[in-house]
Amino acid sequence: MLKLDAVGRQFGSLWATRDVSFTVKPREIVGIIGPNGAGKSTLFNLVSGAVVPTTGVIRFLDQTIDYGKPYQVARRGLARTFQIPKPFKQLTVRENVMLSALRRHHTPRQASAVATTTMEFIGIGELAEASVASLTVGQLKKLELARALATEPVLLLLDEVMAGLTPPEIREMMTVIGSLPKRGVTVVWVEHVMMAIMNVAERIVVMHQGQIIAQGTPAEVSKNPAVIGAYLGEKYAYAAR
Amino acid sequence: MSTIVQLLVSGIMLGGIYALMSIGLTVIFGVLKIVNFAHGEFLMLAMYVAWAIVSATGITTYAAMAIVTPLLFGFGLLVYLLIVRPGIAKPHLVVVFATMGLSIAMQNLALVAMTADLRDVPPLFGGTPIKVGPLYFRVELLVGFLISIAITLALMIFVKRTYIGKAIRATVQDRDAAMLMGINVPRLFLLTFAGGSALVGIAGCIMLPLYSTFPTVGLNFVLIAYVVVVLGGMGSMEGAFLGGICIGIVQSLSGYYVAPAYGQMFYFLVFLLVMIFRPNGLLGQRGAAMVGINE
Amino acid sequence: MVAGRIPAAQGIQAISFSAAPRRGAVSIIEIAVLASCIVAAIVVSNRYAVDIMIRTFLWAGLALAWNIAGGYAGLISFGHAAFFGIGAYTSTILLLNYGVPPWFGMLAGALIAGCAGALLTKVCARLRGPFFILSTLAAGEVVRIAALNWRTLTGGSEGLEIAPVPSVVDMVFKSQWPYVTIMVAYMLAMFALSVWIEQTRYGYYLFATRDDEDGASAIGINPSHTRTAAMAVSAATTAIGGTLFAQYFLYLDPTHVISPDISFQFALICAVGGLGTASGPVFGALIIVPLSELLRGLLSQSISGLHLVIYGIIVIIVILYFPSGVSGAIGRAASRLFPTAGFTTRVQARKL
């Protein structure tokens, strides 16, 4: 589904990501964790086509992505949420989701139907006619997810979607995300809220300072000394050995 | 050979004056991130006021600067408070429409008040050109150029050495950070807009002896100012100076070698070419043209 | 009054109706206004009044055309008079030199203008905000100066004249009736086009691109494509209006036809009426054109330009304090008078 090969991106003299290689299989949920500055956002920008890699090759559905045209990547079936939700402020919730749905359903009427089902699935059905300005953070995040899902993607990039949510909301989202592979969506998920990602993701990739330092199941990764060292400092890594 | 040198040097001098006319526009854009579509009309106002003073009292336009400059400063203040400030936090089209409306209103107020007749002032020293080496120059051109250089230099020193200057540079680079650092950004906006207008006042006094004034004179020059500013990079004073010189030379040469009717078209083509190939201009901030403003 | 739906006829989209002007729906109020325009066109016979009506409807259509680029796509252009001029001159030149009826010349003008619009947008693709606007200003001036100096083609500052010989083929009429009909048809066609755009996928894509280009890109919209198409359509339809103008006034010259004043007027009408709605430009024209006649009548000949001073001030006041224009005000008033559960009070595509 998605394959990164020695992908790197340089900004000035800083390598935001360097020599990143991993594969994502269809219908997997892969989580990416790492301290701040690890290069996770850059990675998403690279995969979604917003930024061009300095080195390496990214292949999505067996085709390379290396142009800076995000809409082409989006049309092939990639959707992403943004860390800071960016809905269309002038439109209602329903219209926002409809816009995404219009990608695959060409009339506004069909798109509206798809939007309704998506909103119900995510749990914001009652907010359909509300204006974006009136939503809480949690609702905005759900809207972000709804908008991404309404394009009926095959690959979904989630960017810190749990940030700012209350524990009940987190649990709701976890259920939603967990059910995505069954609906045919592969998920790559960057997250800081460990409880959520460690319990839902099947495989975890850990990044630190632009490079991958560990890959494996959540259990394996949480015991990995390198990972502990990255988060807590070398002292603790030594103690865990 | 000497023709070319003459043309080049006159071009440079004219360019210096164009630069002065444009510096206000570029600084206003750099700090407030708006384009003042009435910039040309500010110039027109300055020229008319200067003309009125000169005609009434007989003093030279350079002396009239002492009155015109504070007047334009005050006018800029007023315009900022009434028209620009209400629109600053809103989508950019609000300020665009508002300043456009101001531009049209001012142009036609001038038409109504002063009629379309050209107004000019008598030349200095009876109109004989000054001879510098093998070259001849109109006195007003030379004096105008010297004043422009002096003011531009003063501005650059001001911006680099004083607190306000640093505040300006900070705000140009990152408005939010500047606010967080304690810079009174709203007051800075006010000062910049009014100050930019004052600069236009000086430019108007200098340009009056060289060009007649009439209600739509602003239109002619504002497009030159846009080209200068875009060429030099929106927000960059040095860029405006450089851009001005370039355009001055272009105009001087094309005025001689190409039919004057098409001369005006040249600026627009230069403008469009710069917009296409290097929208940030020679010295502007990277990505300024892409991001737009008020995002 | 509640939002209602007419079931879709074969092949036609369902048309939504609502009480007050609302994006994506044709309101009762708008229908009433348009209907009264049609009635007035049929009933009024005073020559002077009919002349004003003709001009009002023409300007409404032109403003609607501008609105597609400026209001829906967010591509504010102060150089649209260039497209207007291209339309007017193309059909006139074809008529005078080759005898091509303006009914066809109109299409040629639209084609050329459409290509010019597409070219301009493609070329200025990376420019945003005031940079784009300045480019349109510059482009408009380039066209004007070219027209002024290309004497062999355009007659330069002397302009072109169409002989006032009535002929249906040549779109010249003695009585005012045919002109009124044509202008009303133009306005209605542009209105229908605008409503249609609002209700289709393309319209949604336009609004999305206008509001947040990166967000639009992320859901698969090609922003450059969307914009170029909007500008091309806007330019082409403006050009058609240009031809109609030429056929009514029978005289063209660059200074008056391709002027920044005309470009400004398109924007003014839309701003006053309500940017980004289908009815906004109509309301705007209904106010501005008769107003300008009134001013011209009240103020003596020697104070030319005073009406423009007033326009300038109107624009400033409207944009700062009534940004959603007349259609916005009507919408707010209507939804206060007829509140219904679930009826959104959002009035227009662009909230300021």
Image: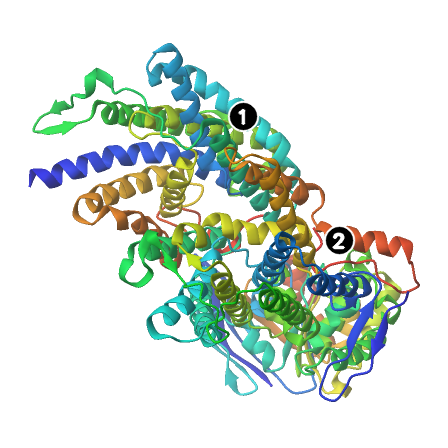
Q: Nearer the viewer, residue B95 or C69?
A: C69
Q: Name the residue under label 1.
A: B75
Q: Residue A35 in the image: x percent, y percent?
A: 64, 60
Q: Residue C322 in the image: x percent, y percent?
A: 72, 45
Q: Which amino acid does label 2 sit on?
A: Gly
Label pair 2/1, CB-CB below 8 angstroms: no
State left or right for residue C335 relative to residue A79: right
The N terminus of chain C sits in image quarter: bottom right
**A77 lies above or below C27:** below
The answer to which image quadrant residue B157 occupies is top left
Which chain is mark 1 on? Answer: B
The answer to which image quadrant residue A48 occupies is bottom right
Category of crowding for the residue at label 1, using alpha-carbon neighbours closer than 10 angstroms: few (below 14), some (14–19), many (at least 20): some
Q: Which of marks 2 and 1 is in front?
A: 2
State left or right for residue C246 relative to residue B141: right
Q: Mark 2 points at which residue?
A: C328
Residue at 20%, 16% in the rendered image: B125
Q: Spatial distance from mark 2 to mark 1, Cα to Cα? A: 33 Å
Q: Which of A15 and C204 is in front in this view?
A: C204
Q: Which of the numbered marks, if any, corresponds to residue B104?
A: none
Q: Is residue B166 visible?
A: no
Q: Which amino acid does label 1 sit on?
A: Phe
